[in-house]
Image: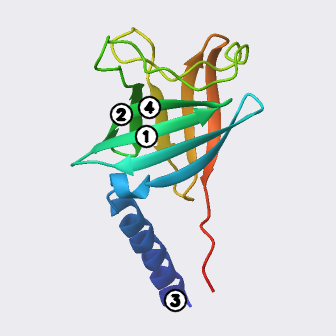
């Protein structure tokens, strides 16, 4: 009986160690994520780039915000992309008056805080972004794609 318990414990430790050893890549973040933050539904579409780089689009309240980011360990750090024309954030196609709750993503070089996105063991994401209402923590799930029959 003791041998069975010892074997089961060793097996549990070995499988936990192998799960921790899986290296997270930008491909693990690729796709469309549904995020709930401050009672708002937000979509985050992440596309892998070269190495540990990604590009992303955050869609909230009728606005699309372009982002770029980098993966370190299990966390993406995302910042807004400036327009090449005048160094400001690109124009957004938003509904006026709706930007008082959650502003667009952090602008690169603006002193704004980056958006942090961390992949959890269960495949969900958690994150934090700073809004004009203060720091906001949120959770998200990957959008499931329908199987074609």
Can you tell which of label 2 and label 4 is closer to the viewer?
4
Residue, disc 2: 68
Mark 3: give few (<14), some (14-19) or many (20+) Cα within 10 Å: few
Task: State the SS at label 3.
Answer: helix
Check if mark 3's residue and mark 1's residue have beta carbons within 8 Å.
no
Q: CA distance from mark 2 to mark 4?
A: 7 Å
Out of 20 and 10, give the one closest to the viewer: 20
Check if mark 1's residue and mark 2's residue have beta carbons within 8 Å.
yes
Q: CA distance from mark 4 to mark 3?
A: 55 Å
Mark 4 or mark 1: name the one nearer the start of the chain: 1
Can you give x and y, in whole percent of width and height, for residue 73 in the image?
34, 44
Mark 3 or mark 1: name the one nearer the start of the chain: 3
Mark 2 or mark 3: name the one nearer the start of the chain: 3
Mark 4: give few (<14), some (14-19) or many (20+) Cα within 10 Å: many
Residue, disc 4: 66
Can you tell which of label 3 and label 1 is closer to the viewer?
1
Can you give x and y, in whole percent of width and height, for residue 137 in the image?
63, 29
Check if mark 4's residue and mark 3's residue have beta carbons within 8 Å.
no
Q: Report the side of 76 relative to 134 (left or right).
A: left
Can you give x and y, in whole percent of width and height, for residue 147 in the image?
61, 78
Q: CA distance from mark 3 to mark 1?
A: 49 Å
Out of 65 and 76, give the one closest to the viewer: 65
Quarter of the C terminus within the rendering: bottom right
Q: CA distance from mark 4 to mark 1?
A: 6 Å
Q: Which numbered circle lies on residue 56?
A: 1
Tell me where residue 11 sits by quadrant: bottom left
Colour pattern: rainbow
Residue at 52% from the left image edge and 89% from the top image edge: 4
Residue, disc 3: 4
């Amino acid at each position: 009986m003791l041998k069975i318990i010892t074997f089961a414990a060793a097996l549990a430790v070995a499988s936990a160690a192998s799960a921790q050893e899986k290296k997270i890549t930008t491909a693990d973040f690729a796709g469309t994520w549904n995020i709930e933050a401050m009672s708002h539904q937000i979509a985050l579409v992440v596309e892998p780039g070269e190495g540990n780089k990604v590009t992303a689009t955050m869609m909230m309240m009728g606005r699309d915000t372009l982002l770029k980011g980098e993966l370190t360990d299990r966390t993406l750090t995302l910042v807004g992309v400036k327009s090449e024309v005048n160094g400001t954030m690109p124009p957004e196609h938003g509904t006026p008056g709706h930007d008082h709750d959650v502003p667009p993503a952090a602008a690169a070089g603006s002193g704004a805080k980056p958006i942090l996105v961390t992949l959890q063991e269960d495949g969900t994401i958690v994150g934090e972004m700073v809004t004009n209402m203060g720091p906001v923590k949120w959770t998200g799930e990957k959008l499931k794609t329908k199987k074609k029959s």
